[in-house]
């Protein structure tokens, strides 16, 4: 008799914060500087140095807590996590353990069947990042401590996630919130967002949690999905073969599509957490909290709903547009210039996003201003140019961000809506193509397209297509 | 050598041109050289001291000078001074130089003190005899067969032997007051947070305080005022009002009976009784209870070693300090560097501290000790509702012989029995010399005050200085 298993997953996410200075010293957090140049006696752990908490980090933590429905602890404790490693100058990482800054929140995700599920957040805490070891420079291992002291938030869920798809969806939502708050760039590939998964299985319908393993080192959303699927399958196979899951840490190898156990010694840590005597408890009073609450931007879920009701665009459009704050901002800027919301949505979803994808840039680097896109849309709406011409104008204004009205005028692309001019062209074409006229009259409707094409060619595409259609029909049937 | 009673007098002499600061510093340097056997100094900054003497001399001439102008000060070698060695009397930091200056030291320099050198101490300030130094024990100038106390033994010995005008020590469980008592000096441990710890090599961060040794009650508040102040580099530092000449005629002094129980040397006890009988004529003296102070030593050694075990993790041979030649792999590098670099007492405390923080022991030791700390704090809060000052012996014995307790750490720890409560509670405490025992060894009397009431401590110190005939 085969037992059916279900999987239980909890995620621990580390988000690197976009503060300009480190969490406990004044060093820059700038990425890409020469090794060991963003350092000072404090982040190097020189004797006698003391950490001073960066207020911005507290603010970011509280903002994320509020955005994820957490309760904010008025008093939270900074703790030391003790272990030896060459990338950790003090021999301990300053973090939080008992009494973290945020607790008991949730993020709502949408399942495939469109139903909603709450993933509970157990805690969010502040901590410092470690440095980096560099192994590929000859025989020696080198240490770069630039990253050491970069502020992180660790976001820990309850074991509420049932499968890899849900994990993916949770991560996307979390990333969306982080980027909406502008506190983390959410880039997993570059390590500014890191995810570890705690995974266990149990016979379907049972309550007790099975022994869990922790999978680390997944550096993309896709890898998180793959690693979770792999580990669930591995555990099920193991149990079905009569084996037993042992508590261990596995490292995901994306090249081999497999997770391998970490060497035993590195995971048998007793971190000996205790309150850091160098730092006083962090106090977030009601006044500060409500100040931060006021500073919260509109969050993605709310914005998505509002786009549907306010602009009357389809839910699908709204989802795409609000997927990133900057795209949503671009849309809202565009519709300040044009009232054709659906058209604006189409242009952004199709044309703008295609350019961004092709050129691998972010929308903030997109040259065409929303105002000029709005003007372009208005030119179509007011029949000054045709949609077809607009598609030709778009690449031209893209790079230089010129006013489309000027381009259209300069290049003489203004649509011909003057019926007499179009009539003249139609008459000429009809007289030159008697055979096709015969065909049309004998019921071959297809030939109609031929006439439209000819008229457009004669007017260099500038003829108002609606007028061309109407006049052609009129003339051909007379 | 031109003699002066205190810094006020020295400054007058300097201003009047009756004393040359350069000659004065040269004299100190000569004396330091002649008293090398005491081993008070780890490093003497001859060149810098002479240079700053000349500069400060000029400043005094010009009439624009700092509050401590010309005061020659020795600094315990746990405080950072830019481009100067910092060893903490440990082999693990034997070739380390600081890249920045501790806030407390910078404040002294800013007020035109002359920094003459760095003094020996117990390794990483762990000890009560100054025998735990990688550079050998320090001798008590009063009796060179005896210890000067610790951990700030070098600072105490340097001042007691007249090798400087004043010195700076640190006090985690009595490390200023006990050596002050053993060498006949005044030593003040200020309120926790009054002096920035930035630049002080941490032993136990929630206990460590920086304070002065002085020979008189007028230099002490001057130095204390300069050292004090909130520092943006130390989140645990607190701003405080400056020390005033406080009228203590109406104060109440509490005498806790727990501090006069078994273990206290009879000569010390009878001398203190004498003092109390004199004080009684001027102040109201009442018996008080501090019932939970009997747990002080236990709580102190759990909490300080816990913090120390973490604070000393940075000395791993990776970035600076001693690195073992045996380093076949990372684990070996850590183990050999630390085994070779640390002395026995430091290792003992790191192990103890690691143990009390370990999974399964944290609640029984660390958390319980934190509770005890709070309970002791409550004892003192209640006591200070009734009295202004608490009087007690500083030490259970006078200075003991070098080597006498080195094989008996527990009896060494018990030497801190009267001093550790002030550090657990964070209150200020002073040790004042009140005469000698039959071996001619100094006896110290301790007063403790409520937080930020250093003024009362200094006032009572002045009173004793002016009114008690020293035996
Ligand atoms: Zn730094």
Image (tube, coloured by chain):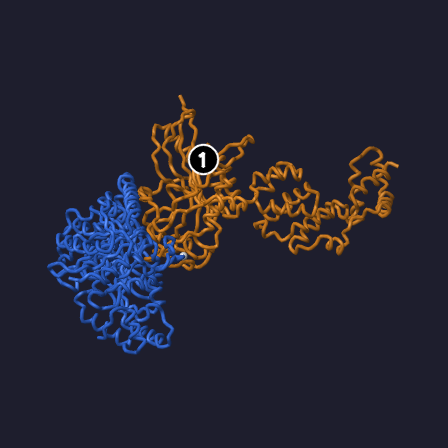
Chain colours: A orange, B blue
Q: Residue furthest right?
A: A478
- The answer to whether one can see residue B201 in this image is no
Which part of the image, by quadrant, shows the C terminus of chain B? bottom left
The answer to which of A434 and B441 lies nearer the viewer is B441
Residue B289 image point, x, y percent: 24, 44
Which part of the image, by quadrant, shows the N terminus of chain B? bottom left
The residue that mark 1 highlights is: A229
Q: Is residue A60 left or right of residue B358?
A: right
The correct choice, above or below, for A158 with respect to B422 in the image is: above
Q: Residues within 10 Å of mark 1 (few under 14, many from 20)?
A: some
Q: Residue furthest top?
A: A1
Q: Is residue A9 left or right of residue B2?
A: right
Q: Residue furthest left?
A: B438
Residue B160 image point, x, y percent: 20, 65
Which image quarter has ligand 1?
bottom left
Q: Residue at x 39, y 55 (%)?
A: A145
Q: Quadrant of residue B374?
A: top left
The correct choice, above or below, for B282 with respect to A171 in the image is: below
The answer to which of B315 and B259 lies nearer the viewer is B259
The correct choice, above or below, for B222 with respect to A291 in the image is: below
SS class of the residue under badge 1? helix
- The answer to whether one can see residue B144 in this image is yes
Q: Residue furthest bottom?
A: B17
Residue B207 image point, x, y percent: 29, 51
Residue A295 image point, x, y percent: 54, 46
Q: Quadrant of residue B41?
A: bottom left
Q: Is mark 1 within 8 Å of ligand 1?
A: no
Q: Is residue A448 left or right of residue A325?
A: right
């Amino acid at each position: 008799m085969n037992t059916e298993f279900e999987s239980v997953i909890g995620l621990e996410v580390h988000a690197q914060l976009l503060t300009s200075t480190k969490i406990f010293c004044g060093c820059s957090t700038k990425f890409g500087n020469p090794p060991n140049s963003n350092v000072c006696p404090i982040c190097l752990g020189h004797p006698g140095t003391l950490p001073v908490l960066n207020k911005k980090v507290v603010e970011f933590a509280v903002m994320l807590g509020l955005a994820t429905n957490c309760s904010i602890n008025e008093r939270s404790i900074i703790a030391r996590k003790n272990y030896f490693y060459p990338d950790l100058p003090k021999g301990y990482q300053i973090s939080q353990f008992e009494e973290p800054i945020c607790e008991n929140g949730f993020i709502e995700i949408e399942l495939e069947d469109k139903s909603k599920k709450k993933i509970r957040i157990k805690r969010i805490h502040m901590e410092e990042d470690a440095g980096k070891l560099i192994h590929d420079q000859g025989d020696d291992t080198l240490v770069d401590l630039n990253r050491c002291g970069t502020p992180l938030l660790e976001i820990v869920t309850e074991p509420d996630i049932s499968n890899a798809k849900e994990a993916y969806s949770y991560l996307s939502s979390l990333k969306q919130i982080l980027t909406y708050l502008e506190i983390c760039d959410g880039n997993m590939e570059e390590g500014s967002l890191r995810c570890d998964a705690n995974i266990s299985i149990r016979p379907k319908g049972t309550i007790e949690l099975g022994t869990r393993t922790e999978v680390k080192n997944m550096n993309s959303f896709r890898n998180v999905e793959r690693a979770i699927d792999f580990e669930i399958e591995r555990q099920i196979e193991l149990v079905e073969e009569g084996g037993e899951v042992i508590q261990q840490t596995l490292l995901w190898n994306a090249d081999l599509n497999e997770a391998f156990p970490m060497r035993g010694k590195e995971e048998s840590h007793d971190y000996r957490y205790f309150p850091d005597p160098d730092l006083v408890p962090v106090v977030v009073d009601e006044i500060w909290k409500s100040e931060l609450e006021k500073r919260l931007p509109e969050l993605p879920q709310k914005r998505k709903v509002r786009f549907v009701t306010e602009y009357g665009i389809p839910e699908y459009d709204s989802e795409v547009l609000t997927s990133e704050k900057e795209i949503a901002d671009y849309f809202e800027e565009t519709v300040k210039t044009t009232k054709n919301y659906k058209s604006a949505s189409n242009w952004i979803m199709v044309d703008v996003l295609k350019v961004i994808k092709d050129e691998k840039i972010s929308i903030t680097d997109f040259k065409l201003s929303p105002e000029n896109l709005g003007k372009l849309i208005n030119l179509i709406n007011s029949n000054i140019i045709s949609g077809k011409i607009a598609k030709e104008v778009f690449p031209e204004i893209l790079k230089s961000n010129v006013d489309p009205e000027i381009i259209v005028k300069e290049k003489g692309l203004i649509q011909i809506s003057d019926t007499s001019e179009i009539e003249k062209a139609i008459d000429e074409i009809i007289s030159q193509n008697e055979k096709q006229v015969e065909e049309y009259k004998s019921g071959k409707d297809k030939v109609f397209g031929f006439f439209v094409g000819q008229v457009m060619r004669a007017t260099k595409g500038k003829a108002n297509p609606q007028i061309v259609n109407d006049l052609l029909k009129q003339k051909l049937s007379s | 050598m031109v003699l002066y009673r205190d810094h006020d007098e020295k400054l007058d002499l300097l201003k009047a041109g009756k004393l040359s600061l350069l000659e004065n510093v040269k004299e100190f340097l000569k004396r330091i050289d002649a008293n090398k056997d005491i081993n008070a100094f780890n490093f003497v900054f001859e060149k810098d001291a002479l240079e700053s003497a000349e500069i400060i001399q000029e400043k005094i001439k010009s009439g624009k000078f700092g509050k401590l102008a010309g005061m020659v000060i020795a600094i315990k070698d746990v405080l950072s001074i830019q481009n100067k060695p910092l060893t903490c009397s440990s082999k693990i930091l034997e070739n380390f130089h600081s890249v920045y200056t501790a806030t407390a030291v910078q404040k002294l320099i800013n007020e035109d003190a002359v920094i003459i050198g760095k003094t020996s101490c117990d390794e990483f300030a762990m000890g009560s005899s100054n025998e735990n130094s990688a550079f050998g024990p320090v001798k008590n100038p009063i009796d060179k067969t005896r210890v000067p106390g610790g951990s700030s033994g070098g600072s105490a010995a340097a001042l007691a032997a007249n090798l400087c005008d004043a010195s700076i020590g640190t006090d985690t469980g009595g490390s200023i007051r006990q050596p002050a008592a053993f060498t006949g000096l005044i030593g003040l441990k200020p309120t926790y947070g009054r002096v920035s710890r930035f630049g002080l090599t941490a032993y136990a961060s929630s206990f460590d305080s920086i304070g002065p040794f002085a020979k008189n009650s007028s230099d002490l508040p001057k130095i204390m005022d300069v050292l004090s102040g909130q520092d943006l580099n130390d989140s645990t530092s607190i701003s405080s009002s400056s020390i005033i000449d406080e009228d203590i005629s109406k104060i109440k002094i509490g005498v806790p009976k727990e501090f006069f129980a078994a273990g206290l040397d009879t000569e010390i006890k009878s001398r203190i009784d004498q003092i109390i009988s004199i004080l009684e004529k001027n102040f109201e003296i009442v018996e008080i209870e501090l019932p939970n102070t009997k747990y002080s030593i236990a709580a102190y050694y759990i909490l300080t070693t816990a913090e120390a075990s973490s604070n000393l993790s940075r000395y791993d041979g990776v970035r600076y300090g001693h690195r073992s030649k045996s380093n076949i792999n990372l684990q070996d590098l850590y183990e050999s560097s630390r085994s070779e670099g640390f002395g026995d007492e430091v290792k003992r405390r790191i192990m103890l501290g690691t143990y009390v923080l370990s999974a399964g022991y944290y609640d029984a030791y660390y958390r319980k000790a934190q509770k005890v700390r709070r309970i002791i704090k409550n004892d003192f809060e209640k006591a200070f509702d009734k009295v202004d000052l608490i009087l007690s012996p500083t030490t259970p014995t006078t200075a003991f012989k070098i080597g006498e307790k080195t094989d008996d750490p527990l009896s060494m720890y018990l030497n801190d029995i009267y001093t550790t409560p002030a550090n657990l509670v964070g209150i200020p405490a002073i040790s004042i010399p009140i005469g000698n025992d039959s071996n001619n060894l100094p006896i110290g009397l301790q007063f403790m005050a409520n937080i930020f009431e250093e003024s009362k401590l200094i006032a009572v110190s002045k009173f004793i200085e002016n009114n008690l005939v020293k035996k």
